Amino acid sequence: MLHNRGIMPHWIDAHCHLDAPEFAADRIKVRAQAAAQNVAICVIPAVQAESFAQARACAHEGGDAYALGIHPLYVPQAQDLDLAALDAALERWQDDPRLVAVGEMGLDYFVPALCEPAMRARQWAFYTAQLRLARKHRLPVILHVRRSADMLLKGLRSIGGGRAWQGIAHAFNGSPQQAQAFMDLGFKLGFGGAVTFERALHLRHLAQALPLEALVLETDAPDMPPHWLYTTAHDRQLGVAQGRNAPGELPRIAEAVAALRGISVGALAEATRTNACQALPRLAALLV
Ligand SMILES: [Zn+2]
């Protein structure tokens, strides 16, 4: 009897915090469940210097990929020395085929405490320093974009000096013009569980209308639960915990994106795999 393993779509979760404490108790099981759903590779972006080794260890443990960076939400507690630690880690592990990018880095202008002038300046300093490190170590970048697309683009243009970038604007939810600007600079745009909410009209329009060549899929697990895992504010007040997102949810999220675009799940899998490998070229060697 023929078994159809060869024709099952397989997936890249382009953004998944498998190293997060939420997965400490059952990470191997969570990864195995994702593998059973044909998630071939997770990209695990570190968020702070003290978790660089952990992100790398998780990637090696699960046959996955990792990125090293300082997330804007971790900038308030980050030290200047952490940038030197990032530089040193990128140097030390430069020949590790599972190290695919610098990130998660970026700017967050949603969280009020991060919008204070001094903290905006500090976020900017960490972001632009990490862009320089990505250039120095010839690696793509994984960007956190929250109400900050124009400033992120400004940084890319000023540090890039007219040359193209490679990377992913993760959890993209900007305007079509901002999407085009990221694409023009060489970026792919990450979509995840947020597109599964019927009320997310703007995001669903983007996921439907952007060129297929621009899209990568991601869970951002344990965050960004799709609607079937989401606990409403009302239920949380009653003591129900927020559902934990996991990389095994990616194929079901993909079904929602494929339905929006009117294409087959298989076609979406193939296109988004190709796109992820263009954004993060070292992934290609890990897929075979
Ligand atoms: Zn993230």
Image (cartoon, rainbow, N blue to C red):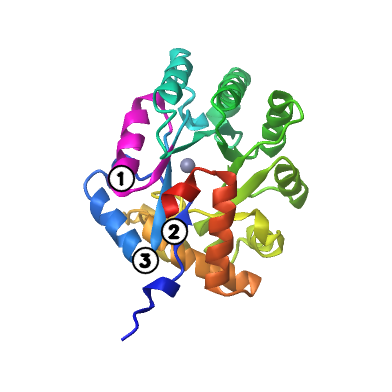
Q: Amino acid at mark 1?
A: Glu
- Between disc 1 and disc 3, the foreground one is 3
Q: Residue at x 59, y 48 (%)?
A: 278
Q: Amino acid at mark 2?
A: Thr
In reply to whether residue 29 is colored magenta, the answer given is no
- Between disc 2 and disc 1, the foreground one is 1
Q: Nearer the viewer, residue 233 or 73?
A: 73
Residue annotated with mark 3: 37
Q: Earlier in the sequence, mark 2 or mark 1?
A: 1
Residue 231 location (% of width, % of height): 40, 59
Would you call the spot at circle 2 few (<14 residues within 10 Å), some (14-19), or many (20 or more)?
A: some
Residue 123 location (% of width, % of height): 57, 24
Q: Secondary structure at mark 2?
A: loop
Q: Residue at x 35, y 45 (%)?
A: 18
- Between disc 3 and disc 2, the foreground one is 3
Magenta residues span 47-66
Would you call the spot at circle 3 few (<14 residues within 10 Å), some (14-19), or many (20 or more)?
A: some
Answer above or below: position of 282 versus 242. Answer: above
Residue 282 location (% of width, % of height): 49, 43
Residue annotated with mark 2: 232
Q: CA distance from mark 3 to mark 2?
A: 27 Å
Q: Quadrant of the N terminus?
A: bottom left
Q: Earlier in the sequence, mark 1 or mark 3?
A: 1
